[in-house]
Image (tube, helix red, strand yellow):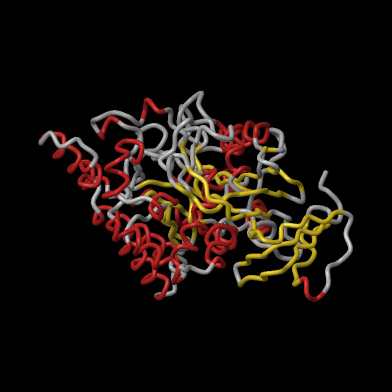
Amino acid sequence: MAAGHQIVLGHIVLASGEIPDGYVEIDKGKVVRVGAVSAGIPAAEVEYDFRGSYVFPAAIDAQVHSRSQKDQEDFIWSTKSAAAGGVGTIVDMPYDAGRLICNAERFELKKSEAQAQARVDFALYATVHPEEGAAKIAELAAAGAIGFKFSTFGTDPERFPRIAPKVMHDCMAKIADYGLFAGVHNEDDETVKTLIAQCKAQGHTDYTAHSASRPVYAENLAITQVYELGADTGCRAHIVHCSNQRGYELCQSYQRQGFDSTIEACLHYLILCEDEDVARLGGRAKVNPPIRPRHEREALWRHLAAGNITVVSTDHVSWSLDRKTHSNIFDNASGATGLALLLPLLVDGAVKRGVPLSRVAQVLAYNPARLFSIQHRKGALEVGCDADLAIVHKAPYVYDAQAGGHNFADWSPYDGLTIDYQVLATMIRGEWVFKDAEVQAAPGFGCFVSPPELVNALLNKEAV
């Protein structure tokens, strides 16, 4: 049960701006008022004084893979890392070992299993089987899918297959009926597979082979395809990870044409770069699309400052270290951890580059809530929303994934980085889930979150 009447004091960071000496008033797990201390502080049962620290809306991590490796992390650990990192809601994508989340039965099973484990709130993507196409979209929308994940690249024939353009077109046309969106992994299949084969034939297998086999143009060819399919079907088209500046320019172009096109950066593209970090980390920094050179990283920060990045996610996956340390880059799994650092690393990077903190609140909370159609509950410190917030304090430290006990994996590509900011506390629905350096929430505290009235109304209309 949510705590009663509470006041949280601090430097309030909103998507619309900042209140340097402000408060958030909370009652029965909901935000009831946000204001400046100078106007007077309302009476409350409990007052938490975090003056000198930032109070952000809790982050929504738009891309998490809790079940990529069987018997590894699962929701019990991914949501523990989330709580420690100021993330109030995770959006889990279907890359589940042994199970394609492509029908209502599998979706409901995943939902029930996640509900028993989750320490923070969660939403779930669904996907489709390439041979079934749009046949199961209605039942997955009815089950509460936040959106649908596709790939232009065949990562795995069973659990993450390539969806051909005609099939994706049919699916997107159906998704549009429910007001949901299509989130697409953006790499051109033919280009990447041809270049991987070429690199292997030449014996080019060090860390540079990864970016050589997945060039920027392969990424942007796929981005254009996705946006064109969205334009033709009226479906909201979302790119789930863009590593290069031109990709964001393509998104802007479609937005100027009036299309509901959105785009996502991942934390690693904003923090790491190929010439400095991938060279040092090798397989530990292997992600798809690849981490690009330093000039691309800094260009992405300029796009973030300008408001051209819709959301920032982690693309979190907790591979065991033996899947990330091969000398042949092609033998390593793709993906890295990041949940525990999403908010502090983005704040750290923003402050160092003079990017307004309101941008952080936009890309980590406000915009994701609207992308996922959950703004009725999440994403903002606004009246009527869930009291989800994160306290961020300046206290420099050297990151060590093994310290703190909040991560399943004992490694991170961010190990050894000096980070100026850390999360002091995380609140969800008026309850502290992380405080005093400990995760307070028990498994099962997290709640399933899904789009509300729009989908239900359309489903009811179809049933008549």
Rendered view: 454 above or below 120: below
Q: Is residue 159 depicted above or below 86 in this figure?
A: above
Q: Is residue 303 left or right of residue 358?
A: left
Counting from the top left corner in percent of width and height, residue 153 is at: 32, 44
The picture places residue 208, in percent across and down from the top left corner, at 21, 43
Q: What residue is shown at x 43% (from left), y 46% (from top)?
A: 417
Query: In the displayed structure, would residue 104 be above or below residue 423?
Result: above
Judge by depth and name the residue closer to the eye, 283 or 375.
Answer: 283
- The residue lying toward the viewer, choosing from 301 and 163, is 301
Pick whichever, 419 or 388, lies toward us.
419
Residue occupying the point 60% across, 46% down:
123
Residue at 55 percent of width and 65 percent of height: 357
Quadrant assignment, res 5: bottom right
For this rendering, which residue is in front, 359 or 123? 359
Considering the image in quadrants, where does the C terminus appear?
A: bottom right
Residue 391 image offset from top left, x and y in percent: 66, 54
Q: Residue at x 46, y 58 (%)?
A: 349
Q: Position of residue 191 (x, y in %)?
A: 21, 47
